[in-house]
Image (cartoon, rainbow, N blue to C red):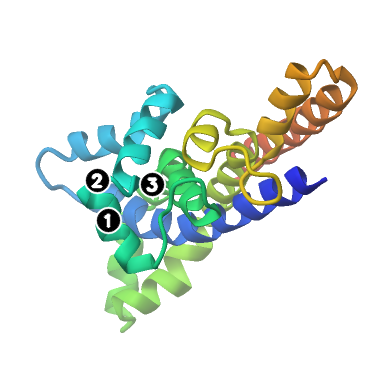
Amino acid sequence: MSAVLVSFKLAFWTMLLLVPIGLIVGRWLALSTVRHKVWLESLIMLPLILPPTVIGYYLLVMFSPQTVSGQFISSIVGQPLVFTFPGLVIASVVVNLPFAIQPIQLAFSHLPHELREASWVCGLSPLKAWWHIELPLTWQGVLASATLVFAHTLGEFGVVLMVGGNIDGSTRTISIAIYDSVQAFDMQTAGFYSLALLIFSLVALAVVRSVNKHG
């Protein structure tokens, strides 16, 4: 069951890091009128269409102790990030960016700007207006973001394998355990893990759909 614990730990940390990022970047993208914003949005959405192995390859090169970037990162964190859980978390954050940002961006884009202007007229600072007015009205997007990130992280395979490897108790997740079980012709274990991921993913999507429908 160590693969289950590693997967849920990875999903938790990825969600914890990405929801604040989603709130900041998603809101900025929703309100910004900066030129060429489409290119930034396209960059954020890249993990949706790029093969996970491509993202994993570039992260592997960036983290490698043989590269300048890898040596710089290692000097900051005190250890190489390749085949470690911290490296796996960073890779997971990168690959889950669109799942975190897009729902929050959509939620903020649907807020009438008049609400913000009214709150400012009432004397609220931009921060207080965000906390007391905007955030309560966009909680559906935040919940959808957290749910999608958590569920997608549990099922991620390509990036996890390339950056984290297959170290039991450290970087071996449920998806890798399924692959290993099939390779060993242990179809019972593979079936159990696969069914668990299927049910969890279905529930997560149902939650997101329900929230969006009643939001």
Q: Nearer the viewer, mark 3 or mark 2?
A: 2
- Is 93 placed left or right of 39 in the picture? right
Q: Quadrant of the N terminus?
A: top right
Measured in 3D between alpha carbons, the distance from the residue under mark 3 to the one under mark 2, in whole angstroms, is 35 Å
- Is 214 placed left or right of 60 in the picture? right
Residue occupied by mark 3: 105
Query: Would you place residue 187 above or below residue 108 in this image?
Result: above
Measured in 3D between alpha carbons, the distance from the residue under mark 1 to the one under mark 2, in whole angstroms, is 6 Å
Residue occupied by mark 1: 71
Mark 2 crowd level (few <14, some 14–19, many ≥20, 10 Å Cα):
few
For mark 3, give the secondary structure. Answer: helix
Q: Identify the residue at image location x=75%, y=32%.
A: 197
Indicate the amino acid at tag 1.
Answer: Gln
Which of the two labelled residues, at mark 3 and mark 1, occupies the earlier sequence position?
1
Q: Nearer the viewer, residue 12 or 209?
A: 12
For mark 1, give the secondary structure. Answer: helix
In the image, residue 50 lies at what x, y percent? 37, 23
Residue occupied by mark 2: 67
Indicate the amino acid at tag 3.
Answer: Gln
The part of the image, by quadrant, that contains residue 208 is: top right
In the image, residue 114 lies at what x, y percent? 30, 60
Q: Identify the residue at image location x=22%, y=40%.
A: 40
Q: Nearer the viewer, residue 59 or 93?
A: 59
For mark 2, give the secondary structure. Answer: loop
Which of the two labelled residues, at mark 3 and mark 2, occupies the earlier sequence position?
2
